[in-house]
Amino acid sequence: MKRKEFMKKAVGCLIAALLITGCGGNTQNSQGNTADQSKSSENVSESTENTTDNDTDSSAEDGGNSVTTDSEKSTEAQAESSDSDDISGKWVLVYTSYHSEYKDGDVYDNITMAQDDEALNASFDIQEKDGKYITNHKYDYYETTLRVFGNELIRYEEPAYDGCANSKWCYGFSGSEDDDVLKKKLTRVDDMLLTAYEYSYEDDEYGYSSVTTDYYLREDSPKLKDQDSLRYFDTVTVDNAESLLNEIGNNKKIILKAGVYNMSGIPKNTVGNKYVQNSGYDYTISGVSNLALEAEDGAEVQIVIGEAYSPVLNFDYCSNVRLKGLTVGHEVEPGYCSGSVLYFQGSSGVKVENCKLYGSGTYGIEADSLYNLEVENTDIYECTYGMLSLRNSGNLSFNNCKFHDCRDMSMICLSSMYSITFENCEFTDNVINSNNCYFVEMSEYDDVIFKKCTFKGNEYNNFSNYNVTMEDCSVEDTERVSGDIITMSDINNSVDLVDLYDKAVAKQSELDKEINGDKVLDQQTLNSLSYEKFYLWDALINKIWSYLGGTLSEEEMEQLTQEQRKWINDKEAAAQEAAKPFEGGSMELMIEYGVGAEWTQKRVEYLIDKYIRS
């Protein structure tokens, strides 16, 4: 709550000050207002002035960890004050840092790189004329556009903000006496131009002070040739799991030496990192921006966990995470695992490259609210539920990946997704054992494209429950003669639908008997049976929907669509609420599927009674 409130107020005030800045010199009026800042407010990042101190909370002295620091990779913003006063030239934005300190002692930080989707677009053109600096300034952020032309900069013998590395001097924009005090200050630290805006707020509930700092390089700087490397202010090398977790931090590249990193074998109370949360049986990396975990060149690096119910690597509200050259998986017996290999919640800008993700994890990658994922040259194999489970996410791409030897349920599970592309991927020897499952299980409006992909030796009853786009793909699979009650074949009339409903009721009775019978079933089997119940009714409601789309008038269908969307939201909310007490446990999926099946059956009966039987 503090973090979101701070970002809304601080960034809003920054833009307000910039709008005032437009009044100095010859200017054009800015237009538009800022958009919702919630995307950037979810990213908690260390300010550049404190990156080294705060991000390396533990060292080689803690628990005998082995860590090597490459100080040459540190950000130039941490350097001592430059003797040069020259700020002339054309400057382009590299990154922006937001730092706030609350009176109760809490500190929140965020860093956004210029190439990130949520970043602003800004530049300076500063010319020295007659011993004075005259600047043109461009600032674009969401719907806000600002241009400042011919503004004379005024020198002050003071730092741009408290704690600035250049404590000697700064510049400010000029303006008339009628204007508000212009808060934005410019200074230089080593080869970077900094602009800073300070703000403070206090009310009866809480107070805080903040500083927003933009960092620029001259447009001819050789550093701009590899802008992505500018994300990392520090590079360290580790050789064990404890060191790895203690070194997690913002704007950091961690190189992993060869070996096995066992996340279950870390001694208690040896991880002291504010970015790593310990639930008692696993670890969650939370609130990190610009983090890279990479295997050392030529090294075989394996990250494992012995907890069957936990993801191996769990990322919560992180941005711009890179995983490269890693082998990641569970060290448990197949059939006893209910945790995915990689799990992402509320994250963005993730890249997985040259990795191997293996079972018995339930899925190779599971995600909820993940945006902008790139997976390249990566293998996902031997998972026990399927390959991928992705919800409420978008802009995901898989290139030159191999998916093989996964078992049991729907292989690619999608819900409320957009823009998912598989290109030059291979899908081989994946087998679906459960009835009413699909190779691609998706929501009605999901957008999935397969380009130049190969499907060979996979076994399933039905490839997908909705249409997917296939471009230049090769398919040599075994599509079994379906023993399912509900197939995706055409429905000719309402009698067929009523007949399918009766068969679905009978099939559910069989499943209930198996679930509630005398035979003791393991949790994976119970989850699978609950899954069958849900998709039994889900497949039927999809067929009913297709039939109604061809029989109702356009106006009737539009009204029903609005009702259906509300029902879907209510159903998903009810399932999540029911599963809350079991969150993270092996029963969570069973409860969600059970509630989903109950709601969907009732909806099917409503639609049949109102539109089919009448």
Image (spheres, rainbow, N blue to C red):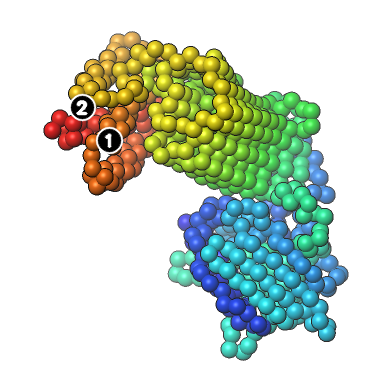
- The image shows a total of numbered marks equal to 2
In the image, what residue occupies the spot 30% across and 33% down? Answer: 546
Q: Quadrant of residue 565?
A: top left
Q: Is mark 1 on a helix, strand or loop?
A: helix
Q: Is mark 2 on a helix, strand or loop?
A: helix
Front: mark 1 or 2: 1
The CA span between labels 1 and 2 is 12 Å
The quadrant where residue 590 appears? top left
Residue 283 at x, y = what percent?
Answer: 57, 36
Q: Mark 2 points at which residue?
A: 494
Residue type marked 2? Ser
Residue 388 lies, with reference to residue 6, above or below; the image says above
Please give the name of the residue rendered at 70% of the width and 80% of the height, measured from the top-left corner. 150
What is the x, y in percent for residue 405? 56, 17
Identify the image quadrant of the C terminus.
top left
Instruction: Determine the residue positioned at 63% across, 88% down.
Output: 176
Which residue is tagged 1?
A: 550
Q: Name the residue at the right extreme.
A: 83
